[in-house]
Image (tube, rainbow, N blue to C red):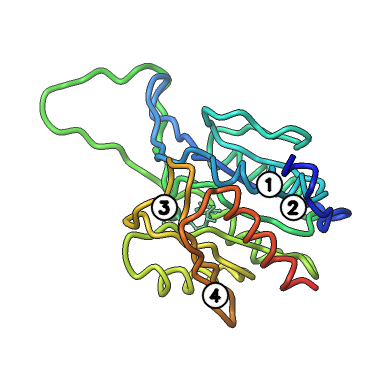
Amino acid sequence: LREVAFEKDLSGKKVLVTAGPTQEPVDPVRCLTNHSSGKMGYAIAKMAMLRGAEVTLVSGPTAIEPPLFVKVVPVVTARDMFEAVTAVSDQQDIIIKAAAVADYRPKNVSEDKVKKKDGQAFIELERTDDILKYLGQHKKDGQFLCGFSMETKDMIGNSRAKLEKKNLDMVAANNLKVEGAGFQGDTNVLTLITQDEEVSLPLMSKEDAALKILDKILELTK
Ligand code: CTP
Ligand code: CA
């Protein structure tokens, strides 16, 4: 019932959300990834849809059901996500990058399963593209760009640095060490950081946190 009661205050807006982890293959059986569940990004996509937006969700591999009435583009690697996002980013009014994109990938991907040997082993890594930084460098007039920031220390300082460096309009920051925040649960504790302010939200469901993010974006784009 709550779902039909939403004011359609995002109607006419195109919203692109990214969610989940990426997986960077090592060989046909192994990959580098992280603990992102996709729940935060999926909640944002769902709430934006319920508020009337035309939503595209570019998602890394997750175990959760995608929201209805959202265009879902499944991806695996950071490279796939870069391509899926940049293919549609020009047309978006709002882009929210909740995905936990791998910063590094194995430099060489073995065609066959790597067999174990005695002693230490190493995987040579190379950097992935920073999708959000690219979007900041190619931001369209009037486009709103929101990043996420996951930190375990100096959350505000590190997140502000990302706001500046990536030319973002907002960063939704969370500290993995705070109870109820982070990757796997159904709740989050976010601080919304913009050029002029920092709004610390209390512990709340990821759906409610999604609504707060969308409220703040609407307030700033009016
Ligand atoms: N991000 C991205 N592409 C990458 C890495 C990160 O688009 N290759 C985006 C994430 O989707 C997120 C934001 O950048 O919205 C911040 O991600 P985070 O991992 O917190 O920061 P980084 O800039 O990668 O820096 P670090 O991991 O060193 O803290
Ligand atoms: Ca990172």
Residues at marks 3 and 1, CA–CA distance in whole angstroms: 26 Å
Q: Quadrant of the C terminus?
A: bottom right
Q: Earlier in the sequence, mark 4 or mark 2?
A: 2
Q: Which residue is mark 4?
A: 164
- Residue 181 numbered tag: 3
Q: Where is residue 52? Give x, y as percent.
A: 83, 49
Contact between labelled residues 1 and 3, with CB atoms less than 8 Å apart = no
Q: Position of residue 113 (x, y in %)?
A: 35, 17
What amino acid type is highlighted by mark number 1? Val
State the SS at label 3. Answer: loop
If you read the primary sequence from the N terminus, does the residue marked by circle 3 or circle 1 appear first? 1
Determine whether label 2 and label 1 are within 8 Å by CB: yes
In the image, 158 versus 181, the foreground residue is: 181
- CA gap between label 4 and label 2 equals 20 Å
Residue at the disc numbered 1: 85
Residue under numbered circle 2: 89
Q: CA distance from mark 4 to mark 1?
A: 21 Å
Crowding around mark 1 (Cα neighbors within 10 Å: few <14, some 14 to 19, many 20+) is many
Q: Name which residue type carries label 4.
A: Glu
* On-image quarter of the N terminus: top right
Looking at the image, is 153 positioned above or below residue 62? below
Judged from the image, the secondary structure of the residue bearing numbered disc 1 is: helix
